[in-house]
Image (cartoon, helix red, strand yellow):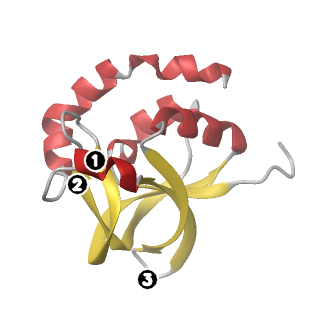
Amino acid sequence: MKGAVTHHCFTYGSLMWADIMARVCGREFASEPASLAGHARHPVRGQDYPGLRPAPGGIVPGRLYRDVDAQAWARLDAFEGAEYERVRVDVQLACGAAVPAWVYRFRAEFAARLLPGDWDAAAFEREGHARFTARYAGFDALAGR
């Protein structure tokens, strides 16, 4: 799509895994490690994925997907659902450069569902990835959006 508007997407949970991001978006995007200051990610009660909330002094590691197109954003919005809001942030790349991006932050009205402590990405890799992928096998149903 020549002239299509794209934006970068910062991910900090299940979408850091390129296979999950590609299934949700319907295609792959170039990506690289990045981090987001002033936030923390917490486990969501009863889920394998985390929620992001503002936290002074916090730093969240994640993955920046470049040039996400409008069709993929529509699928991401549907996937994230009512608990998350898409907000604009600046993330830092490994080289130190700051890059504007959108991120899905857990809405304040649902904050009671967040557990204390940091979400464990290594545990998701070991145990949650397969369970999460099986649970969200309906990714492909988002294709009509």
Q: In this view, does 28 lie above or below 42?
A: above
Looking at the rendered structure, the kind of residue marked 1 is Pro
Where is residue 119 drawn, in percent x and y? Answer: 19, 52
Q: What is the quadrant of residue 49 in the picture?
A: top left
Q: Which is more foreground, mark 2 or mark 3? A: 2
Where is residue 81 drawn, in percent x and y? Answer: 48, 36
Q: What is the quadrant of residue 59 in the picture?
A: bottom left
The residue depicted at 14 percent of the width and 37 percent of the height is 126
Q: Mark 1 points at which residue?
A: 50
Element type at marker 2?
strand
Q: Residue 96 carries which label?
A: 3
Q: Residue 42 carries which label?
A: 2
Q: Is residue 101 above or below residue 134?
A: below
Question: Mark 3: few, some, or many residues within 10 Å (few <14, many ≥20)?
Answer: few
The answer to which of marks 2 and 1 sits earlier in the sequence is 2
Tell me the quadrant of the picture where the N terminus can be found: top right
Q: Which is more foreground, mark 1 or mark 3? A: 1
Q: Residue 32 carries which label?
A: none
The residue depicted at 33 percent of the width and 42 percent of the height is 14
Rounded to the nearest whole Å, what is the CA distance between mark 2 and mark 3? 25 Å
Where is residue 2 drawn, in percent x and y? Answer: 86, 47
